[in-house]
Image (tube, rainbow, N blue to C red):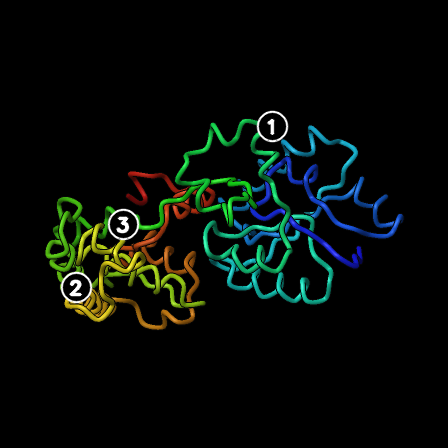
Amino acid sequence: MRRSSFRLVAAAAAIALAVTGCSSSSDDAANEDTEFEIFTWWASGGEAAGLQGMIDVYTAQNPNTEFINAAVAGGAGVNAKAVLQSRLDANEPPDSFQAHAGMELDGYVRGGQLEDLTSLYASEGWDKIFPADLIKTLTVDGKIYSVPVNIHRANVLWWNPAAQAKAGITKAPETLDEFFADLEKFKKAGITGLALAGKGDWAIAHLLDWMLLASMGPDKFEGLYNGSTSWTGPEVAAGIKNFQKALSYGNKGAGNLDWPDAGKLVTDGKAGFFIMGDWASAQWQSDGLKLGTDYT
């Protein structure tokens, strides 16, 4: 569908079709009554299964609407964001698209590309259901512009129980010193200590975040973003040093691996630890693996 001007709903939900606003020709308007295109990077494994669950609910409630799943594979949306931008530049937007809450949405809002959903939140009572801190990340200049469809935890430490036993590790590390001691044990056992995914850089950036957080604590880490902690201070220097140390225990060829590939190093017993979000568990379960047996 070609549209001369448009507004989109980011972070798609089942109600997005009802609130998408765009001006178009009469033929396009007729198509919009029967088609709904959602643009995400949930293209495989547990992510695709989660998206399909939402699609099933939507199509059951809207049987006369064709749901177009325009997913583009690639961790953290690295590929999807590039494709989305090309479509926006060509004035060929989807009806709804996935994005991370917070500053990632700001450019779309400032560009007039997103629909104001504040009244919808009020009419549906979402402003009372969702946590205030979450709604704050969806709000720009007092208006709400997206609908959360899930909340992830990004800094989970996963490991392989068999590799852990082979290395003589009996419990999960609780401090950075214990973490690095365990990495050394994996190394001595002939196992790569830390699975790394460098494709697209985002997973390595996550690792830097978590090394900074573990090195300086939550208050000073938050201070990096509110200005109370200096980026040139000793806390950051210590965090970067720990980050570099963690990288030294990583797998060769990490730059060619996306996170599912790096995660497979752990589930196959070729690597010990993997720092990745809780979405990794859904991926592994979709592969038939069991939490507590094949991975922890």
Real-space Cα distance between discs 1 and 2?
Answer: 46 Å
**Residue closer to the observer: 217 or 184:** 217
Give the image location of residue 152, x and y in percent.
Answer: 40, 44
Q: Nearer the viewer, residue 271 or 8?
A: 8
Q: Amino acid at mark 1?
A: Ser
**Residue at mark 1 to residue at mark 3: CA–CA distance:** 40 Å
Verify CB contact (< 8 Å) between mark 1 and mark 3.
no
In the displayed image of the protein, which residue is found farthest to the right? Answer: 26
Nearer the observer, disc 1 or disc 3? 1
Q: Which residue is mark 2?
A: 235
Which label number is shown at residue 123?
Answer: 1
Q: Give whichever of discs 1 and 2 has the lower sequence position.
A: 1
Instruction: Identify which amino acid the numbered label 2 is placed on.
Output: Glu
Q: Are marks 2 and 3 in contact (CB under 8 Å)?
A: no
Q: Please name the residue shown 47% across and 43% down the image.
A: 286
Which residue in the structure is indicated by mark 3?
Answer: 157
Spatial CA span between label 2 and label 3? 22 Å
Q: Residues within 10 Å of mark 3 (few under 14, many from 20)?
A: some
Q: Report the residue at 37% width, 55% height from top.
A: 263
Question: Relative to 52, does residue 88 appear above or below in the rendering?
Answer: below
